[in-house]
Amino acid sequence: MIFRQMFEQNSSTYTYLLADENSSEALLIDPVLEHLQQYLELLRDLNLTLKFALDTHLHADHITALGALREATGCTTMMGVESQAPCVSRNFVQDDRIVIGAVELEVLHTPGHTDDSYCFLLRGEQQPWLFSGDTLLIRGTGRTDFQNGDAAVQYQSLLRLLRELPENTLVYPGHDYKGWTVTTLGEERRCNPRLQVSSQDEYVRLMDNLHLPHPAQMDVAVPANRQCGAGL
């Protein structure tokens, strides 16, 4: 398997490229419009065909490259069905499979940050890989105060991940603001302050008291991303 982790500095967003070496089919997770040419150059350099472009949720802090990638490559664009984004080629739901050659991602609906938040699970031979979007971050979790976010629902999503996946699961988040690139589920269970709470009610209180400013691009990004970034 070919794997690349790419970083967009303005919104501290990670984009992930996965590809099957035998079929040369590839997918991108959470691509950012500003880096469109970088993605296209990488695909050309590695002689890959982009089959899918996926968003883990409807982003509020950057403009997605889904629409531009579909125009440039003919790839299939996908978001969760809850996103209500008519621009995508297809929607995914819990337990769907997204396949490129021998690489298969399992789709996990993990609402809470937003109602359309998803993670993607790759079950490797040695250990699973979880592309966690904004559901689980390194030493943090996605905020829950807009876009139908719900701290109690997010707490249950996090509990499900911790209960169902092994501790050695690699976690690749949708963002990081400290320069960290990867963690494990066990490490987050032990070290993530937001996972040290003793109950759902305590987690809700913690999230309700964050009082974070809204993302700077939110008023532009959300409606634009419902159109897959078209016209921008």
Image (spheres, helix red, strand yellow):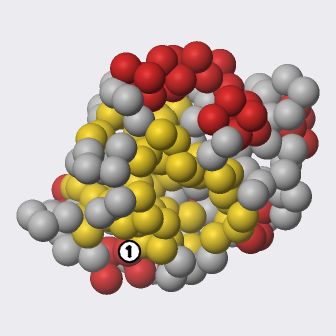
The vertical placement of 161 against 23, above or below, is below
Please name the residue shown 37% across and 66% down the image. 104
From the viewer's side, name the closer residue of 206 and 118: 118
Please name whichever residue, 149 or 109, is drawn nearer the observer in this view of the structure.
109
Q: Is residue 119 visible?
A: yes
Structural crowding at the residue carrying mark 1, measured as other residues with C-alpha within 10 Å and reported as few (<14), some (14–19) or many (≥20): some
Q: Is residue 111 depicted above or below 7 in this figure?
A: below
Q: Is residue 132 left or right of residue 218?
A: left
* Picture coordinates of residue 71, whole percent (x, y): 74, 34
SS for tag 1? helix
Q: How many marks?
A: 1
Residue 119 image position (x, y, % from top left): 48, 63
Q: Is residue 190 above or below residue 71?
A: below
Label 1 sits on residue: 161
Q: Amino acid at mark 1?
A: Leu
The answer to whether residue 113 shows anywhere in this view is no
Q: Is residue 213 left or right of residue 95?
A: right
Q: Which x, y percent locates residue 136?
A: 44, 56
Indicate the quadrant where residue 94 lies: bottom right
Q: Residue at x 63, y 76 (%)?
A: 93
Residue at (26% x, 69% y) in the render: 123
Q: Does residue 171 lie above or below 186 as drawn?
A: above
* 207 on left or right of 229: left
Give the image location of residue 173, x and y in percent. 41, 46
Q: Is residue 152 left or right of residue 13?
A: right
Q: Quadrant of the C terminus?
A: top right
Residue at the spot 20% in from the left edge and 74% down from the top edge: 166
Q: Quadrant of residue 224?
A: top right
